[in-house]
Image: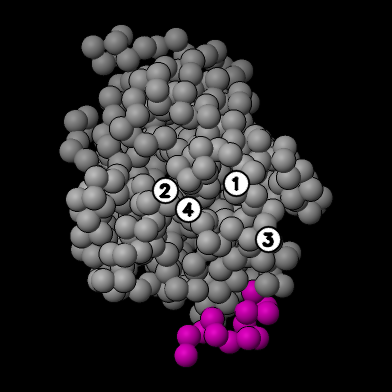
Amino acid sequence: MTVTSDAGLLARARELLAAHPVVDGHNDLPWALREQVAYDLDRRDIAQDQSAHLHTDIPRLRAGGVGGQFWSVYVRSDLTGDSAVSACLEQIDVVRQLAARYPADLRLVATADELESARAEGRIASLMGAEGGHSINNSLATLRAMHELGVRYMTLTHNDTIDWADSATDEPRHGGLSRFGREVVREMNRAGMLVDLSHVAASTMRDALRVTEAPVLFSHSSARAVCDHPRNIPDDVLELLPGNGGVAMATFVPKFVLPAAIAWTRAADENMSAHGLHPLDSSEEGMRVHRAYEEAHPRPLANAATVADHLDHMREVAGIDHLGIGGDFDGTAFVPEQLADVAGYPHLIAELLGRRWSEADLAKLTWRNAVRVLRDAESVSRELCERRGPSVATIGALDG
């Protein structure tokens, strides 16, 4: 019997989440809406149960105790240049459409104070994070424009190394960040946009932590010491978070949390490619191919305890003030048992309660740390804006 089958612990978890709801660092619903229905929101009315198609809808967000969500305005890294910028703007647009369409449930917010007030109103605070620095097309002006539209973090890379930053899952070209990459970090600090270090190479993590004047974020990454995948955070980087003030948000993606799932997922990705599909394809056709492969080749199963193992380790190394949750729902074809969709967070909290995590610590994990890191970035931004204006640096001038 798992801890999360204990009805008493689940009841306590739900009570805790009513008082201290989850601020989740990463949800790819916008991209799923693009892939599945080309942003036709009438065909995916998230006020209704969408469990046949999506990990996310409003009833399940409510059931899961979600009080704040960073919606990923993700762009696949095979989109480049102006096409990447346009796609990111389309992603931003659909998040704004969702907030306008469901005003009783979702509120678009841009600050820590607004996040708190949305919670007081009983609405789910909706923030945005751009996943992949290729989305700015090497333009600091584009970065600033996205911030003005409400983007509050940018993941420096996605799966591919870009012109100024090395990715965790591609060949390095810069030894971390290039000179322009370091200027991107400085300009993000000045604007008040959190530097998200999920997806980047460990060398990029260390470079960014040396350069940044504000706390960083890992929007959806777990512990490399527990599961040795390059997408996870090495202990030496976790050890730097107390000095930086940043927050590492543990993800639920099985191949990042369960060692046995790494090879299985690689084979599943190869199967997608053999069918002429991108491994991250979340269209109806892509999901049919994924499900057929899983039926023929049963996968190793992660569960809430698997994720809790990562959080235990991350708390030991970085401390409770530097942890959060970033599920990556609707951005992964496969999910753990008990964490199958956005209604699953109580199972993780029940697991941690069973491991003697205090309610004060759990309140930091779910709500307080995310609010604090956003507020700290805003404070740094105010100070920097008094000292310097917008950067006019170009990649050509800095990197040649």
Can residue 116 be seen?
A: no
Q: Nearer the viewer, mark 4 or mark 1?
A: 1
Residue at point 59%, 58% (across, down): 50
Q: Nearer the viewer, mark 2 or mark 4?
A: 2
The percent position of residue 33, horizontal first and vertical second, equals: 52, 43
Mark with earlier residue (4, 3): 3
Mark with earlier residue (2, 4): 2
Q: Which residue is mark 3?
A: 59
Residue type, label 4: Asp
Is there CB contact under 8 Å for labels 1 and 3? no
Q: CA distance from mark 2 to mark 4?
A: 11 Å
Residue type, label 1: Arg
On screen, residue 160 above or below 85: below
Q: Which mark is residue 283?
A: 2
Neighbour tally class for label 2: few under 14, some 14-19, many 20 plus, Cα within 10 Å: some
Q: CA distance from mark 1 to mark 3?
A: 17 Å
Q: CA distance from mark 2 to mark 3?
A: 22 Å
Residue at point 46%, 28% (across, down): 87
Count of all numbered marks drawn on residues in the image: 4
Extent of the magenta region: 1-13
Is 372 placed left or right of 392 in the picture? right
Is there CB contact under 8 Å for labels 4 and 1? no
Q: Which mark is residue 330?
A: 4
Neighbour tally class for label 3: few under 14, some 14-19, many 20 plus, Cα within 10 Å: some
Q: Which residue is mark 1?
A: 43
The percent position of residue 338, horizontal first and vertical second, equals: 50, 73
